[in-house]
Every structure is written in C-alpha cells, then in structure tokens.
Image (cartoon, rainbow, N blue to C red):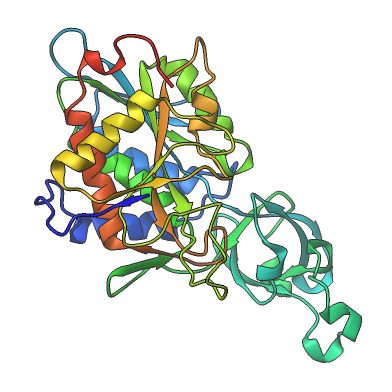
Amino acid sequence: MTKTNETHTELALEIGASQLELLEKLCNATAVSGDEHEVRQIVLEEIKPHVDEVKVDALGNVLATRFGRGENRLRVMLAAHMDEIGFMVVKKHDDGLFEFERIGGIDERQLPGKPVLVGREHLPGVIGAKPIHMTTSNERKNKIETSALRIDLGPEIGDKVKPSDRAAFATRFEVIGPSLRAKALDNRLGVATLIELLKHAPEQIDLLAAFTVQEEVGLRGAGVAAYAFHPDMAVAVDATPANDFPHWDDDDENDRYNTRLDAGPAIYVMDFYTIPDRRLINWLVETGEQTGTPYQLRQPGGGGTDAGAIHKVREGIPSVSVSVPIRYAHTAVSLARLDDWAYTLNLLHTALGRITPDLLAGERRD
C-alpha cells in the first residue's frame, strides 16, 4: 500500500546544503562492519553540541541522550547503523594481489572490475578477474566465486596493506537532479536522519539515539545498545530495497517488496526478524495522514533492521522500522530520491512530537 497526497503540508525540517554536505561526508567515509571508526568520528563531531550525554560503548556504538522536560516522559530509542557492506583482506600474494572475503550480503556477480578503497588510508585498488578473452565457455556460464577474485593494489601500495584490513566500494557521493547516488546510502541516510532529529528533538520525550555497529553481519550492535538504554519504545531508521523496475510480464505480481521510489518513507508491517508493534505502526500512519506526508507500507518480506535485535532485549521493547527506499541496495552504487529522505525525516520529526504516555497505554493488540 502506498499513501500519497496531491497537496502536502509544508515541511518543518528542510534538506538544505548543510544536510547534503553531511550526507556526502558520511557516504564517502568507509565503515565496513567491525571498523566503523570514520563514521563514528563524524557522528560524534556533529552531535556533541546537541546532546546531554554521549558515550562510545565496548562494541563501538555511539549512544547519545537528549533529555526532555516535564514528568512521565517516555524514553524513545532511535537506531541507525553506521556500518556498510564491504570486504576484508585475508591473504597477500605477489605483485600486490590480495585474497579477500565479503562482509555482509554482497552478490558476487557484481564484483569484477569494481574500484575499491582499502584500509584507513583509502588506498585505491580494483577487484580483478580473468578478462573474457581468457575464459572458457563453461566459465562464462557461471558466476565467478569470491575465491577466484583478487583485490589488485599493485606492488608499491600493496606493501601498506595487511590481512584484516577492510575494503569498501570507491563510489563517490553525487546529487543528480532529484536523486542521490552513492555507496552506503544504506544506511548513511539513517545516520544523517538521526543526527538531524537530535538537533531538533521534541521536549516531551527523552530521545535516545543509537548509532550502531555491525548491523550488516547480524544486528550485533543494536541489542547491546538497547540493553544499555532500556527504552520504552524504539524506531529503527534504515534504507530498504525499492522493487520498482517494470515487470516484463504484466501478470508478474510483486509479492515480496512493494516499496518504490517517490512514495515517501516505508513503514514496516513485518520483515524476516520483526513483527512491529501495531500501536507504533498506527502512530506513524496517523501522523502521515494528518500531516499529508506521503508514506508507504512495506509489505511482509525478507530483510531486517536493527529492530530485529532491539525488540527482544530485556522484557521486550515495542519496536517499528521506517526506511528510505533505495534502488540497487548492497551493490557498489545505490540510488535514492531527495524527497523520500525529506519526507522520512519530517514524518519521524512530527511523529516524535506527537508522542504521549498514552501511546503505549494498555496491552499490545495485534
């Protein structure tokens, strides 16, 4: 289901030059799972003037709190993961060639010929494979396994690389008309959104922002963050695959993802890890309806967000996910619409401002 309106209310929070500069900085940083240092430093620099408490926990999560005012404030956790898919160097060969392993869900078919940046020095390399001239007809029928690929850095640069160094796709951030194009829009869009929400936090709640690690390899940081925060409720802010290519067969119904670009934020009703709390789904939907903000309901399908770990912590935490739709997720370049990001930011900002203790009053009813 997609909900759009011909007339939208004026956006309270605009995406301007400073927000785009921040997203560019976040996207061009490398933060493959387990080495989120670069994004973490950007986050800390941005949020410290706007929060009451901030710390980096043992796993590397950034946990920031902005307290509200008044009594009976709900503790509302927002989570966005800092890490991205990528690679780990595992073995060196002669002439600066390196074996590597994939980190996160990456399709091997996408890899040959892709430029990468290796290590914290962002050393330039390329993922190499046999040229088509040298392959057999049988080899051309099958995908190339990761074990047959190498990252090629050349002999001089290769001396600066060691096993365990991470590598990320080298794609740079661009604004192209109404679109945003970059690597790691999953989930730097979420990180940038959380930063903006911390800067404009409502006063009737305690806002608990978790910038999490290792989401792409099993939602590892989010559970630790939720245990530390012990919130009353949680929202995972992420990016989700858009399945909006035209179907060659008109009868081929999309029964896995109905999410598409240009339709606003995707509110989850179920994914592989989580069945969200219906009270929170209704809260977001009602906000969209009352403000004229476009939204879409992401129908049940695969995938998952940090909510998959958060909702199972302690005695259970009511949770929901909201994502910006993107095309070409988990490849060297993804594509999003600027308006979808702006509507996601504003839906969340307005919804947070509408929270009262009554939101979670009574039993969960599904």
Q: Position of residue 252 (x, y in %)?
A: 57, 65
Vertical side of 219 occupied by 357: above or below: above
Residue at 31% of width from left, 23% of height from top? 76
- Is residue 106 left or right of 99 when viewed as pictured? left
Q: Where is residue 61 in the image (x, y as percent from the top left)?
A: 47, 31
Task: Give 154 or 145, whichever is nearer the viewer.
Answer: 145
Disc tally is 0
Which residue is situated farthest in the front direction here?
A: 251
Which residue is situated farthest in the left direction here?
A: 10
Visible residue check, residue 199:
no
- Is residue 37 left or right of 302 when viewed as pictured? left
Visible residue check, residue 295:
yes
Q: Where is residue 264 in the image (x, y as percent from the top left)?
A: 30, 53
Name the quadrant of the C terminus: top left
Residue at 17% of width from left, 27% of height from top? 354
Q: Where is residue 31 in the image (x, y as percent from the top left)?
A: 52, 50
Which quadrant of the structure image shows residue 54?
A: top left
- Is residue 104 left or right of 46 when viewed as pictured? right
